[in-house]
Image (cartoon, rainbow, N blue to C red):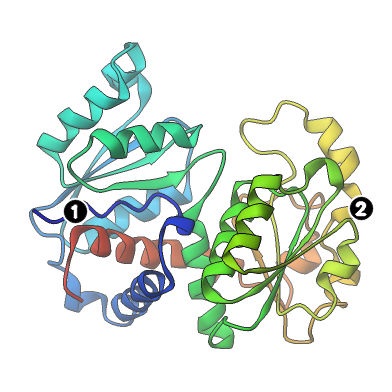
Amino acid sequence: MSAVRHFLDIDRLDKATLRQILAMAATIKKDIPAYRSLFAGRTLAMIFEKPSTRTRVSFEVGMRQLGGDVVVLKPDDMQLGRGETIGDTARVLSRYVDAVMVRTMGEERVQELAEFASVPIINGLTDQSHPCQIMADVMTFEEHRGPIEGRTVAWIGDVNNVAVSWVHVAVRLGVEIRLGCPEIYGPAPELLDWVKREGGRITVTTSPEEAVRGADCVVTDAWASMHNTDVDERAAVLGPYQVNEALMDLAAPDALFMHCLPAHRGEEVTDGVIDGRHSVVWDEAENRLHAQKAILAWCLGATI
């Protein structure tokens, strides 16, 4: 019996696997009708312990577009919300469905699901990482600018879960990553140690201008995530890290701007940037659909 293919975090996958998934995403996107029955007879369970728009809709639509079915589960719908262990939930769902996507808090919950499940587990987001988003981001960059290898990506603001996954993919695909962040919201030492061990190229600076200068892509996110309670304090510290027109002017002339959404316009990004000529945020959001089809196809061993 072959090993179950989980999609847990980008740092757990090698370059060849990431490239395979990205190629599958591009192929499916070009000819969706050709793959209408790819997931026929397959069912995806989606567990949401956090609110969702793009993850919920893109996974559900993606599964249905390719002939599969979905079951959406929230804590109040499940015995998991009444004390059943994650391991027992994983064992039971494995008897009913072909894969499970989970959007939850700590990554240890995803790891425990994977430990006890006999079907693929997909990390739809945790407080520590957001690998599905970053696959869509890379796909979007390469649609607009070609191979991302050797390019420079600047992350501006809090080094949150999305930033961590950007660091992971940058190391795996040979991208220079620059983190422009205040010290208090900088990268964990463990992440920097991992980059060093893996031979990645990373710059950490408290200057957003230094991070952005000459970059091929500028990325940011909301200053406060769903689990943050210190919203006002974060806004005060991160105010100088707003991505505005003046900051984007320091990037490469053809630089792209990305944001995983939802955006807080006038806070981490101005209207002029998110609606401006550098922005590809809507393509980025659409590509969640296509990238996640490919993640599912890879997990399920489908032939593309």
Q: Which residue is mark 1?
A: 3
Q: Residues within 10 Å of mark 2 (few under 14, many from 20)?
A: some
Figure check: 13 above or below 18: above
Element assignment for label 2 = helix
Quadrant location of the C terminus in the rendered image: bottom left
Front disc: 2 or 1? 1
Q: Residues within 10 Å of mark 1 (few under 14, many from 20)?
A: few
Which quadrant of the figure has residue 84? top left
Foreground pick, 52 / 300 = 300
At label 1, the amino acid type is Ala
Seen at 18% across and 73% down, the residue is 35
Where does the image place residue 26, in percent across and percent down from the top left?
37, 79
Where does the image place residue 122, in percent across and percent down from the top left?
34, 48
Where does the image place residue 258, in percent across and percent down from the top left?
65, 66
Seen at 56% across and 56% down, the residue is 165
Foreground pick, 291 / 69 = 291
Where does the image place residue 61, in percent across and percent down from the top left?
31, 56
Element assignment for label 1 = loop
At label 2, the amino acid type is Pro
Left or right placement of residue 86 versus residue 284 in this view: left
Measured in 3D between alpha carbons, the distance from the residue under mark 2 to the one under mark 1, in whole angstroms, is 47 Å
Q: Which residue is mark 2?
A: 240
Dot 2 or dot 1, earlier in sequence = 1
